[in-house]
Structure formats: C-alpha cells, structure tokens
Amino acid sequence: MAALQWSESLSLDLPPMDQTHQEFVALLAQVEGADDAQLVPAWRALIDHTVDHFGTEDAWMRSTGFSSTNCHTVQHRVVLEVMREGLVQGLKNQTDAIRRMARELAVWFVQHAQTMDAALALHLRSVGFDAATPQVRMPQGLPAVPLTGCGSAACATA
C-alpha cells in the first residue's frame, strides 16, 4: 500500500488543483510500487508531472498577485531540485535514493497541500478564480487574465 493515498483531507475545494494533486498522489504511488526496472521511468513521469503542477501554481500566484515574497514558490524550486537529483542517482542505479525520496515526498506533500496550497486556494477563490475557464476575474473591474500552465524548466526555476 502506498504511503500516501488521496483522501478528502487533501481536497482544497478547487477542482483544477485537486485534480492535479490526485494525479500527483497516483504517480507517487506508481513510484512506490515500481520494481527496480520501472523505478526510474516512474520517477521521471512524476518529475514531469510535478514541473507542470508547480509551474501552473506558480503562474496562478504571479497572475493573481499572490505574495511575490512567499516561500511557496521557493519550496517548489527546492523540491524539484531534489527530485532531479534523485533522477541523477537513479540513472546511476542508486535506486535506494529514489525510494527514500518518495517516502519523504509523501510526508512533505501532505503538509504542503494542507498549508501552502490551502492558502493559495483561498486566495484564488478570494480574487474570483474561475475553475471553468480557468481565469481570474481581477477586482475593481480589471479584465480577466487567462491562466496557463508552464511546463518548461525555465518557468519552474523562474
């Protein structure tokens, strides 16, 4: 059984964020269940997803004026850096590093989702985030700003 399973305690009542988080949890479970031959590809798939996941949240924060000095984006950068280091170790057949990282990532994710992502979800709702489009209806009659994810490495480190 995976160390982390999706539950309502992780739901932030923001469908695009919850869907992405469910995908993250599922991919992390695939890593945990992978045999040595499939571990590196599963880890790489989790990294690819996480680049998009964090890039999207970072774009939402920038687009909606969420505090530019918050540590949310910094955590994203650090976690991705560590995950990429795990990939380097895995490519050297040091799979134990990835397995340890996966266990720690499960613990980190719960705390991150229930604190930092919860604050972001509250902020997005307060500025009129529209999950259907997705876009932000800016206060004081400013036009809506379309939100797009950012899957590039440059965005993840911006």
Image: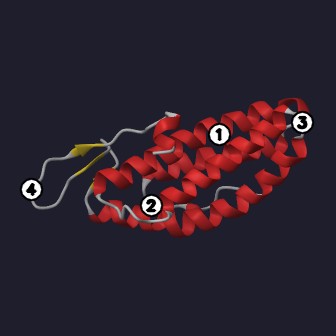
The residue that mark 4 highlights is 141
Is the residue under label 3 in contact with that under label 2 (CB below 8 Å)?
no
Percent of width and height locating residue 33: 84, 43
Percent of width and height locating residue 52: 52, 39
Q: CA distance from mark 2 to mark 3?
A: 34 Å
Could you tell me which residue is drawn at 75 percent across and 46 percent down? 29
Q: CA distance from mark 1 to mark 3?
A: 18 Å
State whether residue 4 appears in this view.
no
In the picture shown, does residue 147 fall above or below 12?
above
Under tag 1, what secondary structure? helix
**Left or right side of 115 for 32:** right
Could you tell me which residue is drawn at 73 percent across and 43 percent down? 85
Earlier in the chain: of badge 1 and badge 3, it is: 3
- Check disc 2 and give the amino acid type: Asp
Earlier in the chain: of badge 3 and badge 4, it is: 3
Marks 1, 4: nearer the viewer: 1
Within 10 angstroms of label 2, few (less than 14), some, or many (20 or more) residues? few
- Check disc 4 and give the amino acid type: Gly
In the picture shown, does residue 91 fall above or below 107?
above
Q: How is the image coloured?
A: secondary structure
Q: Quadrant of residue 112 in the image?
A: bottom right
Under tag 2, what secondary structure? loop
State whether residue 147 appears in this view.
yes
Q: Which mark is residue 89?
A: none
- Check disc 1 and give the amino acid type: Ile
Q: CA distance from mark 2 to mark 4?
A: 25 Å
Marks 2, 3: nearer the viewer: 3
The residue that mark 3 highlights is 35
The residue that mark 1 highlights is 47
- Check disc 3 and give the amino acid type: Asp
